Image: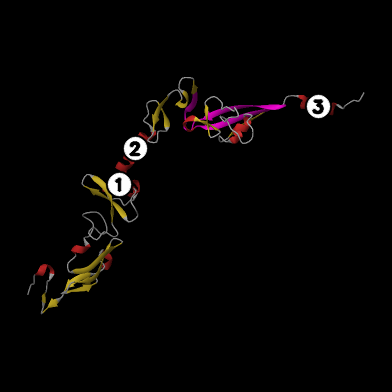
Amino acid sequence: MRSFSPIVLGVLTLISLPLVIANAVPRAATTQLAAQHGCNAGTGPGTSTGCECPAGLYSTQGVCKCHDGAAVKVVIQYLHGGYKESVTCDCPGKHQTYLISANSGATCVCDAGYTATFNKKGKLQCTVNGQPPPSKRASIEHKRSFDEAIDVRESGVESRELEDLMGCEINEKACKMDRHWACKDMWFDLNACGGCKGEALDCAALPGVNEVRCSKGHCIVDSCHHGYTLETPLSANSTSVSALCIPKRKEGNWLFLQGGSEEM
């Protein structure tokens, strides 16, 4: 009779024990899932081959899917000589459970202690009892931040926080319009160049100008009416006007042509 060493006997004993490996692998609901249910290649659950989806799932185009956008999760236990498989559904939101009911079918529901609400897209949201839903909470927080940004603006502190909250472009400034705030162009608006009402310049109303434009918040005068001459102010750094139209002198007096009147 052939004898084995104690080491070899120990190895044989380990091999003879059932090998159990649990492997939880989330997978999409593909034809692989159909194969795991014993379907032939190229077929799927719910087809004429007789393959069926697990409880709580439904078949569409040969694929098993969960309700309410839940993800299919396949858990496989590999055993000695075969494997055991279970299929569950993971709900997309937090604090949600996939409930299978004989009466209402399968759906995602909120866990105990949470209140169910639905967003504009019809998606389930679960919030702790007594708290506002996420959309309302975000609205409250946004209003609080908006009010704080207005206080900063009205205090005279230079900040773009209000513009950022309102989604203004880089060339726009948040301006108060009656009872509301709006983003106003401060770079290229000819009649409100450089800021909001009360601080901006109306480039078109400058005396004697013929051709004028607003460029990055500054009135740029290109030409003047007859009787005016284009001159650069001495204190150009302290004004938002690059040049001015100055009335020409006539025999020691100023000649004003704006509005059609003359002073001799």
Residue 155 in view of the camera: no
Q: Which mark is in front, 2 or 3?
A: 3
Q: Which residues are magenta?
A: 70-99
* Residue at point 42%, 31% (across, down): 125
State which quarter of the image contains the N terminus: top right
* Residue at point 80%, 28% (across, down): 11
Q: Is residue 81 above or below residue 213?
A: above
**Residue pushed farthest left?**
264
Q: Which mark is residue 85?
A: none
Residue beneath label 3, please? 12
Is residue 58 found left or right of 119 in the rendered image? right
First reached walking from the N terminus: tag 2 or tag 3: 3
First reached walking from the N terminus: tag 1 or tag 2: 2
**Mark 1 and mark 2: Cα distance apart in space:** 20 Å
Q: Nearer the viewer, residue 12 or 150?
A: 12
Q: Which mark is residue 139?
A: 2
**Mark 1 and mark 3: Cα distance apart in space:** 79 Å
**Mark 2 and mark 3: Cα distance apart in space:** 67 Å
